[in-house]
Amino acid sequence: MPPALDVPTPAPPQVAAPERPTGPAPDPAMPRMPWALLVACCLGMFAASSSGTTRAPFLIDMARDLDTSLALVANLMALTSIAWGAASLFAGAGSDRWGRRPFLIGGPVGLALCMVLVSRSGSYAEAALWSTFAGGCAGAFTGVLMAEASARTVDRQRGRALGWVMAGQSLTLLVGVPAAAAIGTLIGWRGVNLCVAALALVAAASLFLTTLRPVDGPRKAGAAAPSLRAALSPRVLNLLAMGVAERICYGLTAVYFATFLQSTYQLSLGQVALPLALFALGNIGGTIIGGQLADRLRNRMLTFAAAMAASGLVALALFGWQAGLVPTVALGFAYVFVNALARPSLMAAMANVPDEVRGTVLGLNVTSASFGWLGAASLGGWMMAGYGFGGFGPLTAAVALLGAGLAVFGRR
């Protein structure tokens, strides 16, 4: 047998390795936004805000019917605000323990019942009692609304989602108050309260239908109960302080803008209707665009800081330069627009916490916001009595820069 010949084995063909992309990896496709839920949340926020704000055109009628003073009837808003903030704190923590649906559905139903009882009040004491309970019912679900919207969206959708939810508050000024005034000429303030009750029931039904598919449930057996101390991290405390500063800046103008126009340009109540409508439109537009910025820009804290600093500069011009009614109204629109750009970034950052404490944190946000409103009313009244509206610009700018500084400090 002839010897075997060594035949060289041919090398396998070389296959060129695919080129690695040099740019950043593309972002994964975003899930669809839960638009039905967001509309229901916006409606719920609209109903909650309308329960107190639509009272404004009827203070004189309520004082006469309840045989009390105008000042006491005006103080119903303070009672509502305090109960709202306190209830939100407990409801947020409760939603982390037992789930959000009981609050999302039970809160609007309770609000509807309270509004019916307000409409049947025969004395100021009754109206004050049921108005306070109505504020508590509103607080029981407004913070939970934001937690639910956050849980059903990913991080880079939350600015837009929360922007649409918060737009419900601005719609109260744009649509709710004028509609209440028009309807009230036919059925009175008691009838308007019944209309708000019906609106709250519609919101409850909408939230029931859009939350049938749960994304979370009550706390698992054996799991540690979420605590307030666990939720109050230094980062969350900084965000809450930023929220108080933002609400003071917004409230100083929202509460006193009509009075500023009336005292500066001697306008009647009817003549300030259009400027207030433009003010509300600026708030809605800023909130929606601010949601887009919160989801598209990399650093939400710097977005918040830039918007707050810009609003402080506009406030100096708004209250320090009265060149005429049209420029002042334009500056008011610009101020509230720029101020509203900041809030979705803040809310999206606040919602970016572990799910087991998200309800607690967003409930605390509503509680701190109520302190911001009370601070705005108190500081504004003190400033107006001591220095006039000329002091509003520096005061607002100082608070805005404080909020911007907190954002820069906590940007990491």
Image (cartoon, grey):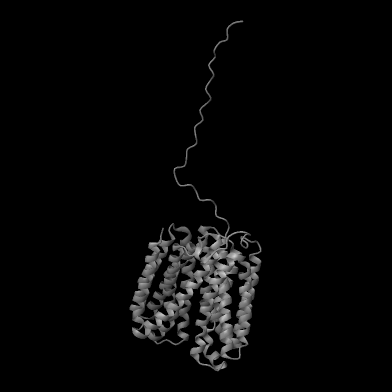
Total label count? 0
Instruction: State the residue in front, 244 or 152.
Output: 244
Find residue 169 and report its horizontal and vertical position in percent: 52, 74
Q: Is residue 323 above or below residue 18?
A: below
Find residue 60 and report its horizontal and vertical position in percent: 52, 90
Find residue 406 and report its horizontal and vertical position in percent: 39, 65
Is residue 333 visible to us here?
A: no
Q: Is residue 270 above or below residue 316?
A: below
Residue ID at (55%, 63%) = 226
Q: Is residue 51 left or right of residue 405?
A: right
Find residue 88 and report its horizontal and vertical position in percent: 54, 72
Residue that protrudes farthest toward the top in the picture: 1
Residue ID at (58%, 79%) = 134
Instruction: State the residue in front, 190 or 346.
Output: 346
Is residue 223 visible to us here?
A: yes
Residue 213 appears in which quarter of the rendering? bottom right
